[in-house]
Amino acid sequence: MQIVTKYGTMWARNTENIRSIPGARAGGVGVYILFDGSMPLYVGKGNIKHRITDARRSKRRGQLWDRFSWYAVAEPKIMVLVLRILLSPKAANVPNVPKSHQNGAVEFAA
């Protein structure tokens, strides 16, 4: 069984790309990451297209990000597992990570 069924990585924040994300009925439920350049700013889950559209309009996050990645999952119950993998310092190949953060608990500075 595939865990990630559809995905897009480091897409530019524009209307065309956001419209290209499948809706919830077309399998567009999963996790997404908002980036400022290559720096991750926010990680979320749910109906990807809807959540990214909301983030674009957000007063708090709206202008802080310029790229996004998204990963649609086959089974919504495994979204937490996918989030842990994406947030894992080992998956990100981050050097010199304190042992307290090696369990997948990663903090992003605002």
Image (tube, rainbow, N blue to C red):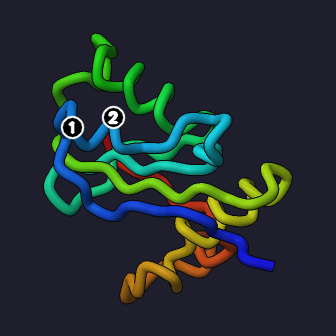
Q: Position of residue 71 (x, y in %)?
A: 53, 59
Q: Quadrant of the C terminus?
A: top left
| Residue drawn at point x = 43 percent, y = 79 percent | 92
Asked if the residue under mark 1 is in contact with the one under mark 2, i.e. CB atoms within 8 Å, the reply is yes
Q: Position of residue 66 (x, y in %)?
A: 16, 42
**Above or below, 56 relative to 108:** above
Q: Which residue is mark 2?
A: 19
Q: Secondary structure at mark 2?
A: helix
Residue 86 is drawn in which quadrant? bottom right
| Residue drawn at point x = 62 percent, y = 72 percent | 85
Query: What mark, if any, has residue 60 been given in the picture?
Result: none
Instruction: Give the total of numbered labels.
Output: 2
Q: Position of residue 44 (x, y in %)?
A: 54, 41
- Disc 2 crowd, CA 10 A, few/some/many (<14, 14-19, 20+): few
| Residue drawn at point x = 62 percent, y = 43 percent | 26
Q: Quadrant of the N terminus?
A: bottom right
* Horizontal arrangement in the rendering, residue 40 relative to residue 103 (left or right): left
User: What type is the residue that disc 1 sits on?
Assistant: Glu
Q: Position of residue 17 (x, y in %)?
A: 26, 43
User: What type is the residue that disc 2 sits on?
Assistant: Arg
Q: Which residue is mark 1?
A: 16
Q: Secondary structure at mark 1?
A: helix
